[in-house]
Amino acid sequence: MAGGLFDEDEVSPAAHVFQTAANAPLAARMRPTTLGEFVGQQALVGPVSHLRKCIETDRLTSLLFWGPPGCGKSTLARIIAGATSAVFEDYSAVTSGVSDIRKVIEAARARIKRGTKTVLFIDEIHRWNKSQQDALLPHVEDGTVILIGATTENPLFELNGALLSRMRLFRFEPLSSEDLRRVLEHACADQDRGLGALKVHLEEDAMQFLCGMAAGDARRALNALEAAALAVDSVEGIRVITLDAAQEAAQQRAPRYDRVGDEHYNTISAFIKSIRGSDPDAGLYWLAVMLNAGEDPRFIARRLVILASEDVGNADPMALVLANAAVQAVLFVGMPESRLILSQTVCYLAAAAKSNACTIAIGRAEQEIANNGVGMVPGALRDPRSVMGKAVAGKAPYRYPHDFPGHYVEQQYLPDDIRSTPYYEPTAEGAEARIAARMAARKQGGGPSTP
C-alpha cells in the first residue's frame, strides 16, 4: 500500500480487497496479493513493462483488461488496489447498475476535494448496455474516477467506442502450462492459504493432466486440484493425487496428448498429413484432440499457414489467404470461438486441390546456389545507377514487358550458365493447371498468354 488518507467509513484497499474466508474455495484463497506472486502475463507486468511501472509508481490511467477466464484480470485489478493510494471501489456489472455508479461518483467528487483519487473496478464490464456505459463516460473523461474494466468479450464489439478510446487496452493471454504448474505447485505447498496442511502430493501425470485440462484457466485448475485433494484418502499422512483421481475430480478423461512429449509431435504430424492427404474428417479429428488437450490455437493456425503454401500452393491460391486470415481471426477472437475458425480452415485446406510445386521450386533454386554459388545479375537487369549498370548501359537494354503483346517478352533473367531445367513446374491440379497452360503458351509463342 502506497499510503493515503481515508475517512472513518473508508477502508484502505489492502485492508479489504484480499480478505478471504478460511472456507473459501482454494482458487479464492490462492489469489495473488502482490506483483511478486502474480503468475503469467509477463508481457504486461514484467519487470520492465510500462504497466508495472505505472502500478509501482501509483500513476494510473483508465485501463481495460481483456482476456479469457482465469488468466488474472480481476487479480491484477486487486493487486493494483493494494498498491494505490486511491480508494478502490469494486463492482460487478452483473449485479450493479447506474444508481450504484452515481453513488460512487458522488463519493469520488468529495474525495477529490481532499486530494484523494478513486479507482473504480468493474468486472464483466461488457455486461453493461450502452446507456450504462454512457453514464460512466464523462466521469472517466474528467478524471473523477480512474476506471479499470475487465471483460472476457471482445471490447471492440461490446464497449462503446467513446469509452474504449479513453482506456488503455491490455490483452491477457491464457496461462501457459508452465504458469499453471507454478500455480498448482504453490497451492500444494502453501501452509496458510493452500493445501500444505493436507500434505498433498500431485503425481506428474496428474499434474500434466490438470495443466492441459485447464486450458489456460488457473481457477479451473485449482478447483479440480481442490476437489481431488478432498476426495482422496490420506495414507500415512499424505494425500496422493493420481491421474485417475485428477480425472475423476475434473470429470474429464485425459487425452493421450501432453503438448510437449511424443504424442504432441505424433498428433500434429497426423493432423498435417491428414489434411495433406485430403481427408477433412481426419483433420478435424486431430484438431479436436489438440484443442481438447489445451493446445495453443495459435500454434495450430501457424501450421495451417505453412501447409497452405507447402501442400496446396498455387493449385488453390486462396488457401494461403484463408489460412493467413485464420491466424488473424484466432488472435482477434480467442477461444473457444477460434475452434470454429480453425475448423473452417481445416475443411477448406483438406478439400482443396493440392500441389507442392512451389515447395519443390524453392528447393531447386537453393540447391543451385549451394552447388554453383550466386551468379552475376544479367546486364539488362542491373540498376542503371549502379557502377555495373553504367558499365553496360546501352549494350544490353532492358525490355519493358508491358510494352509488348500479352505483357510478355523473352529476355534473359537468370545469370549466365544457369542450367536449363526449370525450378517451377506447375502441376495439372486446380488453378495451377491454368498457370501451366499460360507458361506453356509463352514458351511456345513468346506472345500473348492463354488463360
Image (cartoon, rainbow, N blue to C red):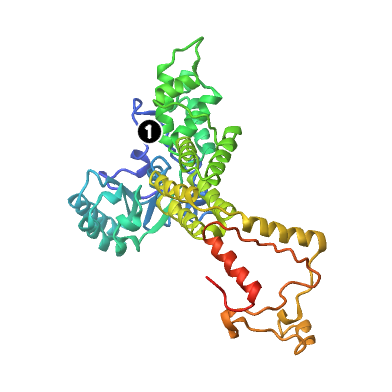
Residue 211 lies, with reference to residue 64, above or below; the image says above
Placement of the N terminus among the 4 image quadrants? top left
Residue 248 lies, with reference to residue 107, above or below; the image says above
Residue 221 lies, with reference to residue 168, above or below; the image says above
Q: Which residue shows up at 44% across the image and 36% down it?
A: 218
- Is residue 47 visible to us here? no
Q: Residue 131's spot in the image, x, y percent?
A: 20, 58
Q: Which residue shows up at 54% across the image and 22% down it?
A: 203
User: For the view shown, which residue lies furthest in the left direction?
Assistant: 99
Residue denoted by label 1: 28
Residue 284 lies, with reference to residue 144, above or below; the image says above
Amino acid under disc 1: Ala
Q: Residue 252's spot in the image, x, y percent?
A: 41, 27
Q: Residue 316's spot in the image, x, y percent?
A: 51, 58
- Is residue 59 visible to us here? yes
User: For the view shown, which residue lies furthest in the bottom direction?
Assistant: 394
Q: In this view of the protein, which residue sits in the foreground, 198 or 212? A: 212
Quarter residue 225 falls in: top left
Q: In this view of the protein, which residue sits in the foreground, 402 or 45? A: 402
Residue 38 vs residue 402: left or right? left
Quarter residue 71 falls in: top left
Q: Residue 324's spot in the image, x, y percent?
A: 50, 57
Give the mark count: 1
Q: Residues within 10 Å of mark 1 (few under 14, many from 20)?
A: some
